[in-house]
Image: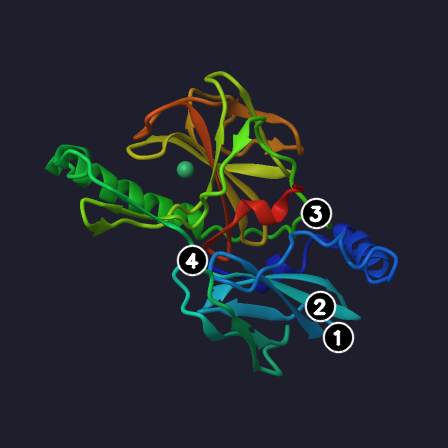
Amino acid sequence: MQFRRRDLLAGGAGLLALQALELRASTPADGGSELWPRTAQVPGGIARLSLGPAPERPLAFADQIPVLVLGDAIEWTALVGIPLAATPGERSIDLRGAKGAGARRLSYQVAAKKYSEQRLKVPPRTVDLSAEDEARYQRERTHLAGVMATFSETVPHASMQMCVPSPGRRSSSFGLRRVFNGQARNPHSGMDIAAATGTPVVAPLAAKVIDTGDYFFNGNTVWLDHGAGLLSMYCHLSAIDVRVGDVLRAGEQLGEVGATGRVTGPHLHWSVSLNRAMVDPALFITG
Ligand code: ZN
């Protein structure tokens, strides 16, 4: 997806509100607790980096991927998703002034986080895909990489606090490393919410629907774009109630919990992606 400067300059209305929120949050009375998402400079977390003042919104990139920049001429802030696969230590973003001037690099530290590991022995046929399924999975992976690269012009609403997309018991299995029959799989890159088939799933934040489909592992899936590289994904749905291009308000239903795709029982798998890094959805919700 092509990245255009004017894309970043839209969305002014929310920025004034954000400024107000930041001013309020910086008062000692509430200790800054109103800033969302919460940050955690660990793999799978989010860094909030102050970029200082500039007359126009700076462009920021993490490994050449455009990064969400909020604020106004008085203070710009970058919100950077840190990949689960990131090595702890120093990381950086690259900044350019809106007119291409003032290129600089801003470094920040990523601390180690030990996610738990699950070792499972399962019948080989449940992990080894047939040639046909493997070909399907590879096609879907390419398609989903394109979806994940979406970077739209709108900056997310001032507060990025999300509501929980579905009622139910929430797992804390984000980042869990799974080893099937001695082979390491990708870590679990979302939150699972246990709920009965048919339980409503709602948009946790205003969004545009950018993809729907029935995928091999993820089953019936909806992808939402909240703006500027903040995306979210809902998997294993029994019903999809939206179409690509639909614009949803926070709390509007997008589908129903189910057990489609490669799962053992009904639940919602919810992922949040920021600059193409899957980050912990728990950072966006209360409790
Ligand atoms: Zn899951």
- Distance of mark 3 from mark 2, alpha carbons? 15 Å
Query: Disc 3 designates what residue?
Result: 157
Q: Are marks 1 and 2 in contact (CB under 8 Å)?
A: yes
Ligand 1 within 8 A of label 1's CB?
no
Mark number for residue 84?
A: 4
Determine which residue is flagged by label 1: 53
- Mark 1 vs mark 2, CA separation in Å: 6 Å
Question: CB under 8 Å between callouts 3 and 2?
Answer: no
Q: Residue 21 vs residue 280: left or right?
A: right
Which amino acid, by three-letter code, is at mark 4?
A: Leu
Relative horizontal placement of residue 245, taking residue 27 as reference (left or right): left
Check the picture and name the quadrant holding the C terminus: top right
Q: CA distance from mark 3 to mark 4?
A: 25 Å
On screen, residue 171 versus residue 49, left or right, reads: left
Q: Secondary structure at mark 1?
A: loop
Upstream in sequence: badge 3 or badge 1: 1
Could you tell me the amino acid type at mark 3?
His
Quadrant, the N terminus? bottom left
Mark 2 secondary-structure assignment? strand
In three-dimensional space, the C-alpha distance between marks 2 and 4, rounded to whole angstroms, equals: 26 Å
Kind of residue at disc 1:
Pro
